[in-house]
Amino acid sequence: MTSAPTPQRSGLAVVGGGKIGEALVSGLVRRPGAAEGIVVVERSPERAAQLVQRYGVRSLDLAGAAAACRVLLVAVKPQDVDALLALLAPHVDPGHLVVSVAAGVPTARIEAALPTGTAVVRVMPNTPALVDEGMSVLSAGAHATPEHLDEAEALLSAVGQVRRVPESQQDAVTALSGSGPAYFFFLVEAMIDAGILLGLPRTLAADLIVQTALGAATMLRDSGEHPVQLREAVTSPGGTTIAAIRELERHGVRAALIAAIEAAHDRSVELGR
Ligand SMILES: NC(=O)C1=CN([C@@H]2O[C@H](COP(=O)(O)OP(=O)(O)OC[C@H]3O[C@@H](n4cnc5c(N)ncnc54)[C@H](OP(=O)(O)O)[C@@H]3O)[C@@H](O)[C@H]2O)C=CC1
Ligand SMILES: O=C(O)[C@@H]1CCC=N1
């Protein structure tokens, strides 16, 4: 008896149209003609309809999405991954590539829930994919070939930069670039509050801080200089900046950031258990 041929498919199904699912879809549909190849699978029909209306993608159930799409991108909460994989497994065949963005969840756990030999790539993206400035970090599962990694990289490079790491580094990556945008938003929020305290109108304070963040990020990326050199160039002898830096050090902000990122790493490890 010959086995059934593996279907040839193209297209991407984003399973879980929440915050990161939407960020990825919104970036990916900017490529001309891409929307017709993208399917969303959402358990809330209202949310599915919203995504269809916003991005011109299709909405299907899991079986329909698996029949139509080669890449199945799992973007549900880590706590929902096992239940989702149980529903997905009967529809997965060797023609699929499964990409998971779930924090902490190891490829081995995903592979164990799917048909033997399924190609799985674990990715940690981040929400700046919304503006094509994402950072996505990839690791291959046991059955993912270099071609599978290339395919995942091609997909994610449409919405920002891509790096590859051994899977053992993914919890640290999650703590740095996965959660990282939130740390910057938190800092910006606090700095705008400081502007309010000093009597500036909120919109002006926000404009000043957002442009300063953008300028500083561009210098970090483009100047080729170390963050310490860039900070020293702002810090005039006997001036304002050193007065602020002394307060940041006195309040342990550096240690707080290191501890915060370590906590995010530890939570990622915990989510993977
Ligand atoms: N947010 C971020 O910046 C990042 C998130 N991630 C990872 O992405 C994943 C999603 O995170 P996030 O987008 O923040 O979470 P959300 O809760 O915003 O999105 C998850 C979505 O998946 C839906 N869902 C759950 N189960 C199913 C199912 N069986 N079929 C279809 N849809 C389902 C949820 O529906 P419902 O609301 O009904 O539960 C929800 O809309 C997580 O694993 C997270 O670790 C990775 C990188 C960055
Ligand atoms: O907070 C979280 O768990 C997810 C993973 C990385 C960013 N958001």
Image (tube, rainbow, N blue to C red):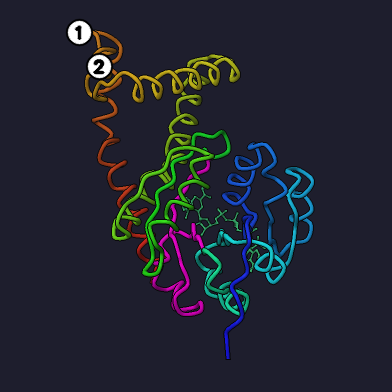
Using the image, determine if residue 218 lies above or below residue 2: above
Q: Quadrant of residue 220?
A: top left
* Cα–Cα gap, marks 1 and 2: 8 Å
Pick whichever, 137 or 49, lies toward us: 137
Q: Residue at x 43, y 65 (%)?
A: 105
Secondary structure beneath dot 2 equals: helix
Instruction: Name the mark on residue 118.
Output: none
Callout 1: 10 Å neighbours few (<14), some, many (20+)?
Answer: few
Which residue is situated farthest in the front direction here?
1
- Whichever of labels 1 and 2 marks the residue nearer the N terminus, that label is 1
Amino acid at dot 1: Pro
Q: Quadrant of residue 47?
A: bottom right
What quarter of the picture does the C terminus occupy?
A: bottom left
Q: Which residue is mark 1?
A: 237
Pick whichever, 165 or 219, lies toward us: 165
Amino acid at dot 2: Ile
Callout 2: 10 Å neighbours few (<14), some, many (20+)?
Answer: some
Q: Which residue is mark 2?
A: 242
Q: Is residue 151 magenta?
A: no
Horizontal arrangement in the rendering, residue 33 relative to residue 28 (left or right): right
**Could you tell me residue 152's position as x and y percent?**
48, 52
Specify the segment rendered in magenta: 98-127
